[in-house]
Image (tube, rainbow, N blue to C red):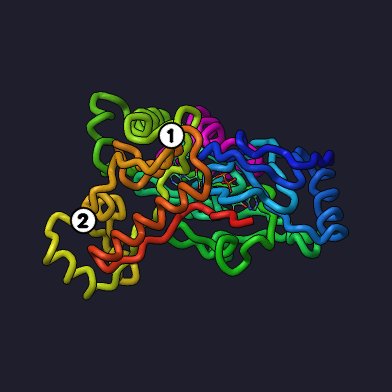
Amino acid sequence: MKIKNNYSLKKYNSFGIDVNSQYFTVIKNDNDIDDLLVWRQQSKQPLLLVGGGSNILFKNNFLGLTAIIETKGIELIKEDGEYYYVKAASGENWHQFVRWTVENGYAGLENLSLIPGTVGAAPMQNIGAYGVELADCLYDLEAIELNTGRAKIFTQEECQFGYRDSYFKSVAFDKYLIKNITVKLSKKPQWNINYSGIKESLEGQALTALNISNSIISLRQSKLPDPNIIGNAGSFFKNPILKEQQWQELKQKHPTLSGYPQKDGSIKTSAAWLIDQCGWKGKRQGDAGIYEKHALVLVNHNKATGEEIWALAEDIIASVNNKFGIKLEAEPRIIYS
Ligand SMILES: Cc1cc2nc3c(=O)[nH]c(=O)nc-3n(C[C@H](O)[C@H](O)[C@H](O)COP(=O)(O)OP(=O)(O)OC[C@H]3O[C@@H](n4cnc5c(N)ncnc54)[C@H](O)[C@@H]3O)c2cc1C
């Protein structure tokens, strides 16, 4: 494992924020992971694991070691009457992994096409899109406990997945390096095509994982900014989860507000709608802005700093709170030092 000093992270975060990491390394294999654990024990420095950097906002330089996970490997490890079991290393690009599965005729991940980032970060916030979450397909994952170096297999239940949440993002935050995941992909797929726009774009085509994936790719390309062209981290805020009573009161005042009932009786509502109602879509504060086609996506028009993006986020949080009494929560990880 080679360590560099004061290394620029500009191309390692999808906002394209120009910050440095005090120390920097790239993890390519098991030996690098072993070296990383020894380095961390000996130096006692903070460690930041990064995949594609597409769910991180750097407010400042990072004081510690940034380790970019680039381990590779995708393999069909077994199949039974009902499922294919496919294992992938953390450093694999998520979208390429999805395409590998659909091109081999395995169904289940197609709705999660074109989500940026890596396989290893996907369980962190239980990535989701178009009615499907990683939790729906994850079989288990292998993680290394950073303090002890011990490897542990976590079953789907042990990952404690929730809406944009998991054991690794909450209780065990920064305690594990996720090394690989295994997904189980059903031989009798249940297609999820009811989300607006998917069914229409599939008209006249056979229902296959590959066709659905292609349709999701086109839909996403028409709605979301490409981080290679304009810096962003996708949805910047989580959709708020409201108690039934608060939801009913809001819905009465704002009949066009949409709500999705959750298993526990609460209602998930649309952060994009709330932000849009406050007039933020397309606005700019210097180079920090809100994407003109999607109120949930904060963008770096060119040279915004992380502080500037965060100041804009705080202004949005305050205005939504004033108008609706709802405090939005940021979805990406915010790095303060
Ligand atoms: C244009 C765009 C669209 C997006 N659309 C969606 C969407 O539809 N749905 C969705 O859920 N998300 C979406 N995202 C957010 C993002 O793509 C996902 O959260 C993705 O999983 C982040 O992967 P990453 O490798 O970039 O993670 P990073 O940003 O590198 O890291 C995210 C977190 O995971 C930790 N981490 C990374 N790798 C590991 C590892 N191997 N072990 C332990 N911890 C690790 C990091 O420390 C950090 O806390 C979008 C982002 C963009 C830019």
286 up-or-down from 151: above or below:
above
Q: Quadrant of residue 142?
A: bottom right
Q: What residue type is disc 1 on?
A: His
Q: Does the residue tagged 1 have its C-beta within 8 Å of any atom of ligand 1?
A: no
Highlighted magenta segment, given as a residue range:
84-113
| Local SS, label 1 | loop
In the rendering, at what x and y percent does residue 201 appear? 26, 29
Residue at which label 1 appears: 301
Q: Foreground: 331 or 126? A: 331
Position of 46 with respect to 52 (left or right) is right
Residue 265 seen? yes
In this rendering, the answer to whether 20 lies above or below 213 is below
Q: Which mark is residue 96?
A: none
Q: Position of residue 139 (x, y in %)?
A: 56, 53
Alpha-carbon span between mark 2 and mark 1? 30 Å
* Amino acid beneath label 2: Ser
**What residue does disc 2 label?**
258
Q: Measured along the vertical axis of the image, is residue 35 above or below residue 144?
A: above
For the view shown, which residue lies furthest in the front direction?
286
Quadrant where the C terminus is found in the figure: bottom right
Q: Is residue 90 magenta?
A: yes
Give the answer, above or below, for where 29 lies relative to 176. above
